Structures are given as structure tokens and as C-alpha cells.
Image (tube, helix red, strand yellow):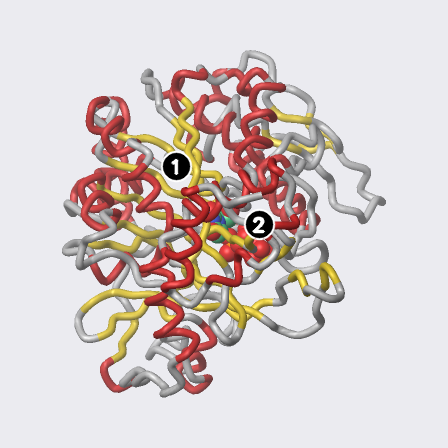
Amino acid sequence: MEMSQEALELKSYFQSYGQGHVFDYFEQLNADQKDQLIEQLKGIHLEELDGLIQTHVLKTEATGGMDYTQLSPSNYIPYPTNDETQALWDEAEVIGKQAIKGGRVAAFTVAGGQGTRLGFDGPKGTFEIAPISRKSLFEVFADKISRASERFETRIPWFIMTSQLNHQATIELFKDHAFFGFDPESIHFFSQELIPSVNLQGKIILEEQGKIAMAPNGHGGSLRALSKSGSIERMREQGIDILSYFQVDNPMISCIDPTFVGFHVMNQSELSSKMVAKTYASEKVGLFCNYKGRDMIVEYSDLPQSYQEQLAPDGALLYNAGNVAVHLFDRDFIERLGNESSEEKLAFHKAFKKIPYYDGEKGMLQTEQNNGVKFEMFVFDALPKANHSIIVEGLREDTFSPVKNAEGVDSPQSCKDAMSRQALRWLNKVEAQVNSDPSDETIVTVEMNFRFAMDESDFIDQWNKLETKPEIKDGCIIGE
Ligand code: UTP
């Protein structure tokens, strides 16, 4: 059968960039498969991809490294330790509450990743994480944002970025759970773009005869996706100018943090970030550093060991500010960077990966070695582009315990433990009696219902309002 005009045009377009092989098996596809491949190919921006292939895959000279003499630790607003610093934090809280009550703040979850390390079949946000109720990551966030709306007497919208690979499954979960009590009108789903993976010779990889191997373009793709999806426009219409960014795999996050918002507003910040203190010198976490006068994140793998180990005069680590991917974005700043033709758009990075591929003779193959390159943008690359940015210290135990791996460090178990410990800590603040058998050396597991209290100060208020205080024992959910 003859190729359609559309297919012929696409083929010559792909051939003009040396990618005509994506049509090698076209004649062996049935009509549906042909249509699907054509749809996929139509969505590929070959000019951009070709630029990435030329600079990241085919070019071999090394780019200039960093001049470490120009590097210093970033300044940050430290967690309050005395009355004076506490007064500043209290002031920020008041200002932040006003901004939230005034409807200026929306929540934003990036959930477009593939979660390969966790090895969970389905969108990561659907992973059950609450230690007792087994609520999913999405439901934990839904509870926290709903409680923030109630507490601040407003309606906080929630933007959720998926990718085309998990969009449908994500929406179905929300529908199956009646949007976790959220007003469906206040949840806005949109997908980030996918970008083809290429082999080490720069050729687009086919994962099946009629299917290109595509991957989401990184969490930095969220800035583009917010612009392209009309979310920025929607924010503007609703008077929202602050977006509270967090990642789907970290349920410890305070989704709407009034003090953080307050500091953002007070400093007219375009991009505010939370840091947590590193626990040991070689911890694998990106670090906030100042380079040539601008804040930026330096990946742990890019910072020489001697710098990682340097000590400040007080004996603490000099490069101490760990990045936990918790930010507040100014709407206009996102718009500036999210525009694809902007000079300030985020750059892509490359990552070598093992990518299953279709071989003409052997069919579909898995590989043991890195055979391809994925391209990703990183959201923290926005930091040096901000004219005003601030970094605020957060307590790790109230900020960060991500679910990355199936076991061990940053796993479901370590996160569940952290959630339970957080609830116990909050209970300790109100001197609640926790009934456990003293001879039992295992840790008591409790769970906070975040629909009841969204953070520590909220919990203290809510607890004090309870006429009868519940008995707290192993296995209980507080605020049910
Ligand atoms: P990670 O960098 O941990 O990647 O994402 P991941 O895809 O979830 O997991 P691995 O590396 O395959 O195991 C951190 C956050 O950024 C989001 C993820 O959904 C997660 O919330 N993300 C990542 C995106 O939204 N899009 C992407 O393209 C990549």
C-alpha cells in the first residue's frame, strides 16, 4: 500500500535530519500502528533534538569545568534559634498567611517521572505510603492542601504535572477516589513533553517496530509545560502569582508553608528554595552554592571531595545546604523561562541509560550496558536565572524523606518511619501521653491525619481545641 501524503512528508522531514530509519518497518505495521507512529512522530521537535544530539552525543570535546576558586556556600535564612530570629520568622508567617488567604498561592506537584528505581507498576503518586491507613502519596498531599484551604479560609488550587506515559492512569486514580474530597474544578492536570531517546551514534531509538523510545523531558520540563498547557494563564486569571513546587515522592513536605511564603513575599523573590542541613560530608545531595555571584545547585558528583569536607569556623560543614526540591516560583518568572524561544530557557542535560530497543533481526532486546542517551531539564537550573532568590532552612524531619528506592535508603520503609516519627514528635510538643508497652523495644507506629492538621503549629492549635484528647497508642491515626 502507498504511503499517505502525510507519512511521505514526515519521512522526508526525518530523513533530512538523518533519522529516516524510524520508517524502516513502516510497511510491516497495521493501519492502527501506522497511525500511532505518525502521531508520535508529529510530536517530535527534530530541530531541538538535533541540536542536543550534535552538542551532547556527537561532540566529543570536554566543556570547560568549574573554576572552584569562584565558588562559595550560598547564604540562607537559618532556622530560628533565638528570640531575635524567631521574631523574623513570626513576621514572615504573618505575611505568608495574608498571601495565602488572599488567594495568591497554588500547590504544584511534579509527577511526570518514571520512578524506575522504585520499580512500582503505575504512577508513583498512587504508591501507598501512609504507615497505617496506607493512603497514597497523592492522597497525603490532597489532605494537606485541603486542610490548608480550610485553615486559611480560601480555596487553594492544585496543579499536577504528569507525562503522557502516566497521565490517564493518574486521572483514573483521582476519579476512582472522588478526587480525595477535592473540588475537581480546583485540580488541574497537564502533561509534560516527551523527548526521544537516542543511541550512542545519535540515532532515535525504536523500542518497537512502530514505536519510538520516548522519555519525559525532566522536572525542568515543568516550566515549559506550565506555559504551554495554559496553566500560567489560568493562574493569572485567578490572581495566583506564587506556585508551591514539590515532588510527588516526598510526602514529608509542607505543601503550603506560610512562613516560607512570607519570606518569598518579603524578599520579592522570583524563586525561593528550601534547604536542609547535610547530615554527613559525602551525602548524595545537590548543594546550594554561590558561583560568580549567583546561587546555583552543584551536584554532589561535581563537587570535589575536599570541598565537601571543608569545615566552617564553628566546625559545621561549610557546604552544608542540601537541596530538597522544594521551591516557590513567581508566576512571571516561570513564564519568562518557560517560553521555548526565550534566551533564558533551561538547558538540557544528558544521561546515559539502558534502553530496550528493537533489532531488525532479533526483535525487542533488553541491554545490560548503557546503550542510549536520555535528555532532561532540571528545575534547579532556574536558580541562577532568578534576579531575586532566597534559600530558607527547613528541618529535615519536617521536610524531606523521599521514596526513591525499593529498599534501604530513601525507600517506602524509611519514609513510613519518618512519617510516624514526625507524628510522635508533634505529639511530644503537646505532651500527649503515648501508650506503649515499656518492655516493647519496637518503635510505636502512629499516623497523622493531615486533613486534621497540616503542620506542627496547626497540630498544636487543633490538639488544644479538642475537648477530649484521644488515647495515643501503637497503630492509631491521630485526628481521625
Ligand atoms: P526523580 O529524579 O527521582 O526521577 O524525580 P523519577 O523518574 O521519579 O525516578 P527514577 O529516577 O526513574 O527512579 C524527582 C521528581 O521529579 C518528577 C518525578 O515525578 C518526581 O516527582 N519528574 C522527574 C517529573 O515530573 N518529570 C520528569 O521528567 C522527571
Question: Mark 2: which secondary structure?
Answer: loop
* Vertical relation: 217 (above or below) 87: below
Judged from the image, the secondary structure of the residue bearing numbered disc 1 is strand
Residue 281: assigned label: none
Q: Nearer the viewer, residue 154 or 352?
A: 352
Residue 284 in view: no
Q: Quadrant of the N terminus?
A: top right
Name the kind of residue labelled 1 in the image: Phe
Tell me what residue is drawn at x 23 percent, y 30 percent.
233
- Residue 47, image x, y percentages: 32, 60
For ligand 1, tell me if the residue under mark 2 lies within 8 Å.
yes
Residue at the spot 27% in from the left edge and 58% down from the top edge: 383
Residue 465 in sight in this render: yes
User: Is tag 1's residue or tag 2's residue first in the polypeptide sequence?
Assistant: 1
Judging by the rendered image, the residue that carries numbered circle 1 is 108
Give amino acid for label 2. Gln
The yes-or-no answer for disc 1 within 8 Å of ligand 1 is no
- The total of numbered circles placed on residues is 2
| Circle 2 residue | 114
Q: Quadrant of residue 436?
A: top right
State the residue at coordinates (70%, 54%). Answer: 406
Name the outermost residue toward the right.
439
Residue 251 quadrant: top right
Judge left or right: residue 173 versus residue 345. Answer: right
Q: Residue at x 60, y 26 (%)?
A: 173
Q: Position of residue 325 (x, y in %)?
A: 42, 52
Q: Nearer the viewer, mark 1 or mark 2?
A: 2
